[in-house]
Amino acid sequence: MRALYQDGGDVRETSSVDDLEVLVKQSTFVWVDLDSSKPEGNEALERVFGIHPLTIEDIWNEQSSPKIEDFDSYLYVRVHGAHAFNPDGSVALAELDVVIGANFLITHDCHRVCTIDDLHAALLRSPKTFGKGPAWLAHTLLDQLVDRYVIIIEQFEGHIEILEEDILEKSGTPEGCPVLARIFELKRSLQAIRRVSVHQREILLRLSRGEFDEIPHDALPFYRDVYDHFVRVTDLADSYRELVTGALEIHLSVQSNRMNGVMKTLTLMSTIMLPLTFIAGVYGMNFEHMPELKWVHGYPFALLFMAAVALAIMVWFRFKKWV
């Protein structure tokens, strides 16, 4: 647990629960960043800030859906950010818990979807943002989360372009299985982002509309800006999801076309070989009175006859534009 508080014109740091209790009683703005579920963290949440036990449970337990809940003395917000874009096209989503009070801000970002360490260092150097209050600092964190979202989700475009090239080259070949796996991985990631973003967009909209007393009126335009940026994330996720769905359809189409080409080749070969097999079968019948059996030129005649039949069939296929 790390806590920042303003002491005159400076920002100082502490991890003592007793110090936090004194600061809260003095109505000093305190930002507490929780690392993990430890006794001092739970003690600070319960005894110092009066956080409801259900909220404490929500903070420590990762949930898959965003949430906003307004209590008498604080506002609890649970949002999700993207903290990694893996080489296979999957995106790692993580939870950010934010508790906004009148003179305190509590955050829990175990996967660091926001650059909290950098923000800590910046506030220690320049306390201007810190002095504005908890709602403004919460806006800074949400803005970082959304900006990182935009950066990560834009990487889908490059992956989809490479994927489309690989589909045209490898679909329907032995190298096509990894391509299909990448398609499903991208689709699964975009579906997870969309599932989160639909609810998260509604939460950011409510924060920007002034529904909650914890968000001052002069901060609402900045929260609307965060909402506008996140709408772009949602739109990009929907757009890329449609592209990946189209890529899957292209993959299946290319695979089907190549399979049809193989079947067409095999069918043509079978069609050519069928009359040749018939001719060979006729001359393979050892009847005593077959006139060609004792003919000196019977063998080359049979071969030439087979070649003529095969050539005639090929000419017919070419005339019908089947080959």
Image: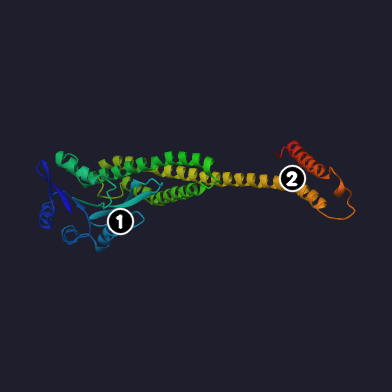
Picture quadrant of residue 122: top left
Q: Whole-percent x and y of residue 275?
A: 78, 47
Mark 1 = which residue?
A: 69
| Quadrant holding the N terminus | bottom left
Left or right, 40 with respect to 214, comes to: left
Q: Whole-percent x and y of residue 145?
A: 30, 45
> Residue at the location (24% across, 57% down)?
72
Q: Whole-percent x and y of residue 160?
A: 46, 41
- The image shows residue 58, relative to residue 234, as above or below, that is below
Left or right, 65 with respect to 107, comes to: right
> Residue at the location (25% across, 60% down)?
56
Amino acid type of the residue tagged 1 in the rendering: Glu
* Disc 1 from disc 2: Cα separation: 75 Å
- The image shows residue 72, relative to residue 255, as above or below, that is below
> Callout 1: helix, strand or loop?
strand
- Between residues 29 and 90, which one lies in front from this camera angle? 90
Amino acid type of the residue tagged 2 in the rendering: Ile
> Residue at the location (10% across, 57% down)?
18
Q: Which of pointers 1 and 2 indicates the residue nearer the eye?
A: 2
| Quadrant holding the C terminus | top right
- Between residues 12 and 304, which one lies in front from this camera angle? 304
Mark 2 = which residue?
A: 272
